[in-house]
Amino acid sequence: MNAQGVLNYLEMLANHSLWVNFSMHMMALMALFAIFVVTKENLKRWIFQAAVSILFLSVTINALIFGNPFHAVTFGILALTALVQLFVRKENIKIAESKWIIAIALFFIFMGLWYPEFVDKNALMLLVFSPVGVIPCSTLLTTIGLLTLIMPSVNRFQYLITIIMGIVYGVIGVFVFSVYLDITLLILALYASGIYFVASPKIKSKTVLCSRTAE
């Protein structure tokens, strides 16, 4: 399939079921609700990781239904990683201490939830019907933003693999398909890479501490 064919496929997918788009927006808002409102640690982790898992699973399922094996494999890996965090790991979810990180993460989450590409709606309606949870780039903008929001309590592997996918899809979107909005995904992925390596020792020590607490 050539570049234009892929873009047509993404447009079809993004407009196929706007109620799915809307439902995935609710998942992202549930993750934000867990971070900012829920106080019980186990419940917070369950809501947050369940929401992230559903976002990834939604892209995976859509890819399987509409015949895109590349999206199915990449987002299947992301979904599996999130499900491991949901059912196996016990890290507590803590919001980032830096106000700058919080502000930047929220901005990119907003961009992912708005994402003015592919869906044939006006700017206001895109806030609830953009293709987050349906096509890769808007979903990665939202999920990398969500994971950045909980630095440094995010699991290292989950964060890293999601960043890598963000770079891959950002490069493809910008340089192969000329979807220049995906520059935002590249910027976020590179920013997240930077804070990952800066905060990596903190993430590691946090993971060890949480594991010992769980034991």
Image: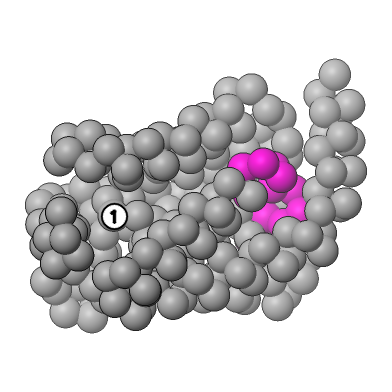
Q: Nearer the viewer, residue 89 or 11?
A: 11
Across and down, in percent, residue 202 comes to 86, 52
| Left or right, residue 153 beside residue 4 | right
Residue at the extreme front: 2
Give the quarter of the figure containing the N terminus.
bottom left
- Residue at the spot x=46%, y=76% of the render? 184
Across and down, in percent, residue 87 comes to 58, 23
| Quadrant of res 209 | top right
| Quadrant of res 51 | top left
Is there any visible trace of residue 141 in the rendered image? yes
Residue at numbered disc 1: 135
The amino acid sitting under disc 1 is Ile
- Residue at the spot x=66%, y=32% of the render? 42
Does 55 lie within the magenta span?
Answer: no
Give the quarter of the figure containing the C terminus.
top right
- Residue at the spot x=40%, y=41% of the render? 75
| Quadrant of res 8 | bottom left
Q: How many marks?
A: 1
- Residue at the spot x=67%, y=63% of the render? 193
Q: Judge the density around disc 1: few (<14), some (14-19), many (≥20) Cα neighbours within 10 Å.
A: many
- Per the rendered image, the range of residues in magenta is 149-159
| Left or right, residue 55 beside residue 82 | left
Q: Quick check: 140 above or below 158?
A: below
Across and down, in percent, residue 190 comes to 61, 69
Q: Nearer the viewer, residue 143 or 39?
A: 143
